[in-house]
Image: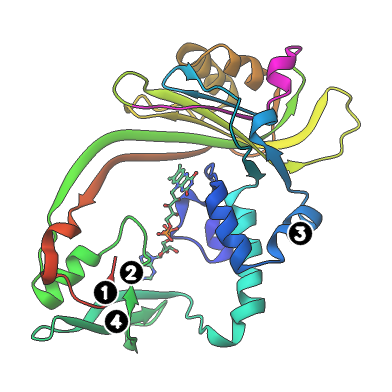
Amino acid sequence: NPASIGRSGVGQIYQIHVLQSEGFNILHDLFPSLKDKLLNEYNIRLYSLKNYGKFVINGNLLKQNLTKDIEWLGIDRFTLETAMRKELCLQFGNQIEWITNARVVELIADRSANVVHGTKYRLKDSSSSLEIYGNFIIDCTGRNTSSTKWLKESLNLIVPTVQMHFGCGYVTFVGERFKTGDSSLDSKPIYFSNANVPDNNTGCYISPVRTIKSTDENSLGILSTIAVNCVNAEYPPNDSYENLLDWVKEHLDRDFPVILNSTKLCSPLVSHHRAIDDRKYVESLGKKWPRNYIL
Ligand SMILES: Cc1cc2nc3c(=O)[nH]c(=O)nc-3n(C[C@H](O)[C@H](O)[C@H](O)COP(=O)(O)OP(=O)(O)OC[C@H]3O[C@@H](n4cnc5c(N)ncnc54)[C@H](O)[C@@H]3O)c2cc1C
């Protein structure tokens, strides 16, 4: 439950997340000891994409002869966030003020200067409003941001938006993979087949998140996050693994039912639906955009 770690607004925290290698390089520059800690304290592994990855993009198998190998961090978002927060506190703890259980409710702005000076916020279980000021105000409240409402209220600025209907759905779970009898599948801890409208509306993504020691000789010794995905509102079911398997058999390439049949479910089937998104055309506002506000 994301609320248990103070992340109730981040429903996607248990969905599959992949950290691209350049993102990992940036994290490594910022937190030089993070990599060693992840490898030694959390049983995380780095995987060579040349040797351990298989990617099918719009039905086409990508060639594995990469000119340069890429390291893939086999980790889940929950663990990475937890480890990163610890590093952030260790390195910059005395420069950060954490205000938790707080909700931003409006901007403090100066209309004539077109500047946002700060925000008003409320603490949980309190109706009184508090204020915080800064030179830069960065809205990090995610894709359900109220920025469009706040900017309208405080600066009379209307952000043009277009609703995108894309019927995106995920069911993610953690599973222990076992041998399928097909070595071309068992040798690939990372296996992605993407969904992409309009021709290819379903996908599956498998990425290792932990190495484990198992006494079962058929275990591949890895826990993986596995996500089954659609982009046409034909949402994969999450009421039972059997029903999910039936859906996978019907909608995905045969490799995936084979792998999922040989996977032991180790978590709930966590579903995520996103039928509509609001695309915000911020750039079209030019200089009308407040100078020190970042969305
Ligand atoms: C199924 C799925 C798979 C994804 N896979 C990937 C992936 O593989 N790689 C990748 O890079 N990205 C992926 N993403 C996208 C990624 O999850 C988001 O881009 C990312 O979480 C956005 O981070 P954020 O910090 O902007 O917002 P969030 O992580 O959503 O955080 C927003 C925070 O703001 C808080 N908040 C909201 N309103 C207020 C308010 N008024 N006052 C105070 N706080 C507020 C919320 O409680 C929350 O804590 C995926 C998303 C989904 C749904």
Q: Which residue is mark 1?
A: 293
Q: Residue 170's mark?
A: none
Along the polypeptide, which appears first: circle 2 or circle 3? 3
Type of amino acid at the residue the image marks with label 3:
Asp
Residue 189 visible (yes or no): no
Q: Which residue is mark 4?
A: 119
Q: Is residue 191 one of those drawn in magenta? A: yes
Distance from Cα at disc 4 to Cα at disc 1: 11 Å
Element carrying mark 3: helix
Quadrant containing ligand 1: bottom left
Type of amino acid at the residue the image marks with label 4:
Thr
Q: Are marks 1 and 2 in contact (CB under 8 Å)?
A: yes
Along the polypeptide, which appears first: circle 1 or circle 3? 3
Q: Please state which of the two labelled residues, at mark 4 or mark 2, is closer to the viewer.
A: 2
Along the polypeptide, which appears first: circle 4 or circle 2? 4
Q: Please state which of the two labelled residues, at mark 1 or mark 2, is closer to the viewer.
A: 1
Does 278 appear above or below 225?
below
Residue 254 visible (yes or no): yes
What residue range appears in magenta? 181-196
Q: Which residue is mark 2?
A: 139
Along the polypeptide, which appears first: circle 1 or circle 2? 2
**Which residue is at 54% across, 31% downward?**
205
Image quarter hosting the C terminus: bottom left
The answer as to whether callout 1 falls within 8 Å of ligand 1 is no
**Which residue is at 60% across, 54% downward?**
78
Q: Which residue is mark 3?
A: 36
Distance from Cα at disc 2 to Cα at disc 3: 32 Å
Along the polypeptide, which appears first: circle 3 or circle 4? 3
Q: Is residue 276 one of those drawn in magenta? A: no
